[in-house]
Amino acid sequence: PAGQGQAVPAPGAPGLIQCCCACACCLICAPLMVLCCCCSGVTSAIQKAQGKRWDAKSHAWVIDNLEEDAGTMKGIPDDDDDILKLAEETAEAEVGGSADAAASAVQAGKVKETEYYDALGVPPDADEKKIKRAYYVNARKWHPDRNDS
């Protein structure tokens, strides 16, 4: 029979044209993919060289101006000594009337337990502002990053 020496392709096997198309796609797509990946890396390197950093929160490149940031930090103290000293002075000034106020608040039935007020160092009839301030001062004073105990 004729054609016995020729290989017969298996059914469903790619032909010569399909193989050529696949090779052409690989030769065109592979360099494009490499170019795209390299370009994003180059853009990132350029932005970093310009002193910018990527801010993930705003999804944008930002420039940090350390001199400007230092200017805004001038009024902020390095430690909490000034806050704690002011709180101690205020507490000492109010100590005289706080025992009488605590007793009267408990007797009036407004407060059943004064344990939390005692921990903060405020009288039970203290207004919200004094309680918040005492909480803030004690949080700063006893914070584990500031206090070794």
Image (spheres, rainbow, N blue to C red):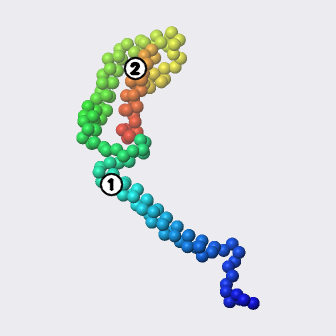
Q: 145 or 94: nearer the eye?
A: 145
Residue 102 visible (yes or no) = no
Question: Which residue position holds label 2?
Answer: 130
Horizontal and vertical percent position of residue 60: 39, 44
Q: Residue furthest front?
A: 2
Neighbor class of circle 2 (other Cα within 10 Å; few <14, some 14-19, many 20+) is some
Disc ID at residue 14 = none
**Label 1 crowd bin: few (<14), some (14–19), many (20+), radius 10 Å:** few
Say which element carries label 1. helix
| CA–CA distance in space, label 1 to label 2 | 52 Å
The residue depicted at 36 percent of the width and 38 percent of the height is 146
On screen, 50 above or below 32?
above
Q: Nearer the viewer, residue 130 or 39?
A: 39
Q: Is residue 88 above or below residue 57?
A: above
Residue indicated by mark 1: 46
In-front residue for pair 131/46: 46
Q: Where in the figure is residue 21, as x and y percent of width and height?
A: 56, 70
Left or right of residue 49: residue 138: right
**Residue at x 51%, y 16% (from the top left corner):** 111
Foreground tag (1 vs 2): 1
Q: Residue at x 67, y 86 (%)?
A: 6
Q: Quadrant of residue 100?
A: top left
Residue 114, can we see it? yes
Q: What x and y, as percent, mark residue 41?
A: 39, 57
Is 111 on the left or on the right of 38, as rendered? Answer: right
In which quadrant is the N terminus drawn? bottom right
Describe residue 15's horizontal placement relative to residue 141 as left or right: right
| Mark 2: secondary structure | helix
